[in-house]
Image (tube, rainbow, N blue to C red):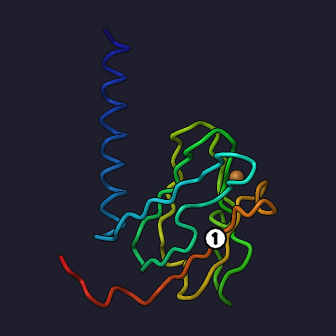
Amino acid sequence: MRTLLMFSLLAGVLAFSTAAQAQSTGDGEVIIVKMIDKSTAEWRFEPSDITVQPGDVIQFVQEDVMPHNVEFTSVPKGAELGDKKFGPFLIANGDVYELVIDARFLKGVYDFVCTPHATLGMTGTLTVADSRITNTR
Ligand SMILES: [Cu+2]
């Protein structure tokens, strides 16, 4: 009984922190990028050419079987991505890496790769545009 109570409390705390996080990202859009390895000839991010605005969230989704990640290899002058420069490896099918386009992502063009599969063509380009000009909400 005590264990159940502890679990309920923990679940409540987790739910609360998730909600708080979602709020802090503002009303940005969610962009889904699939990480694909269908055969030896198909290693890619889909889409591989992404344009976002500050506050948006990119969800990288592991669609197949090989471990994939997101490593930024080129960033605009002055951009310091910190722990976002090298993302975690997504091992299991369905794993998601959520990348929030926060203040560290200065306006400009970023190149990224999946570290182990860069030479197989698993690369992409991220363009961070100006702050939202047209807000349709
Ligand atoms: Cu990969």
Left/right placement of residue 6 relative to residue 100 reads left
Percent x, y of residue 23: 30, 62
Q: Residue at x 20, y 80 (%)?
A: 136
Percent x, y of residue 126: 57, 76
Which quadrant of the figure has residue 93?
top right
Quadrant (top left, top right, bottom left, bottom right) of the N terminus: top left
Local packing at callout 1 (Cα closer than 10 Å; few below 14, some 14-19, many 20+) is many
Quadrant (top left, top right, bottom left, bottom right) of the C terminus: bottom left
Percent x, y of residue 106: 55, 85
Left/right placement of residue 16 relative to residue 54 reads left
Asked whether 114 or 5 is in front, the reply is 114
Asked whether 83 or 107 is in front, the reply is 107
Q: Number of numbered discs present? A: 1
Q: Residue at x 34, y 12 (%)?
A: 2
Q: Residue at x 69, y 42 (%)?
A: 66
- Residue extending farthest right: 119
Relative height, residue 49 to residue 65 (above, below): below
Percent x, y of residue 34: 53, 55
Asked whether 77 or 122 is in front, the reply is 122
Q: Which residue is drawn at 51% across and 74% down?
A: 50
Left/right placement of residue 89 relative to residue 23 reads right
As helix, strand or loop, the secondary structure at mark 1 comes to: strand
**Is the residue indicated by label 1 positioned so its CB lies within 8 Å of ligand 1?**
no
Tell me which amino acid carries mark 1: Gly
Q: Kindly identify which residue carries mark 1.
A: 124
Relative height, residue 37 to residue 7 (above, below): below
Asked whether 42 or 55 is in front, the reply is 42
- Residue extending farthest left: 137
Relative height, residue 95 to residue 104 (above, below): above
